[in-house]
Amino acid sequence: MHAQIIDLSSWEARWRAFLLQHTTADAAHDLEHTRRVVVNAQRLAQHERADLAVVLPAAWLHDCVVVPKDSPLRAQASTLAAEAAGAFLRTAGYPRAYIPAIEHAIAAHSFSAGIIPQSVEARIVQDADRLDALGAVGIARTLMLGAVMGRPLYAAEDPFAIRRPPDDTRSSIDHFYTKLLRLAATMQTAVGRREAEQRTAFMHTFLEQLAAEIAAPQSL
């Protein structure tokens, strides 16, 4: 891809405006989530020497279509977002040479889509988004979304899914075991993996403290 001079700072205001005008956010996918993903992506891109002309628009627009977590279309959300972002960027006059790579990075960021990232930029956007599902912010997002969806904090009869398969439709804590604690192993960049492991360790500490407070074992 040939380098092209782009004033990315002016484009960031346009990406933000597009999100505010066209996206209905949920409790875990608001503008602050997007901003954190952008910050994560910028940091990872610096380490990986990736092309910000792809990374930044993909990070800003990765959730420009939000599908509810309990929707049967959930696995299609990132593909729908990629299509919407590509259409917007073409209409807005963004350099077309970058748009297919941006669309791929958006489509591949999703855990539920299962699309393998094929570029360093796509790997960065995927890692940047997954980092925001971990650590203190990840815990807060999980609990906020669980509350909105009417899920209890934990399943009282077996809070940490010791004697049953974890099922995050039953409780917010189950989501740690169905997805969140597995994310560090899926990270695509070395810097992202180190950060994910640190944030995951914090989540284990949270679970240990929760177990102590509710007097429930975490293992048999």
Image (tube, rainbow, N blue to C red):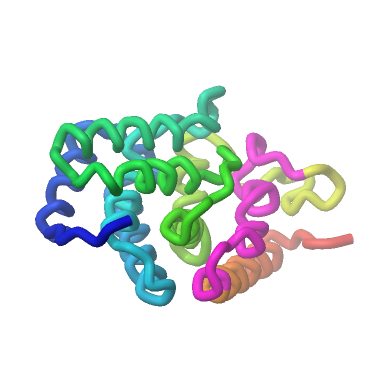
Residue in view at x 61 percent, y 64 percent: 184
Vertical position of residue 55 compared to residue 154: above or below: below
State the residue at coordinates (53%, 68%): 189
Q: Magenta segment, which residues?
A: 166-193
Can you say whether 131 is above or below 66 in the image?
below
- Counting from the top left corner in percent of width and height, residue 93 is at 14, 40
Callout count: 0
Residue in the image at 22% along x and 34% along y: 88
Whole-percent x and y of residue 69?
51, 34
Task: Judge whether residue 170 is colored magenta.
Answer: yes
* Spot occupied by residue 5 in the image (x, y as percentages of width and height): 15, 61
Q: Could you say which is closer to the camera, residue 71 or residue 126?
A: 126
Quadrant of the snapshot with the C terminus = bottom right
Is 47 placed left or right of 21 in the picture?
A: right
Which of the pair 133/2 is nearer the observer? 2
Residue closest to the eye, 183 or 177: 183
- Residue for point 60% across, 68% down: 200
Dividing the picture into quadrants, the one containing residue 152 is top right
The rendered magenta stretch, by its main secondary structure, is classed as: helix
Q: Residue furthest right?
A: 220
Expressed as whole percent of the image width and height from the top left, the position of residue 159 reads: 73, 50
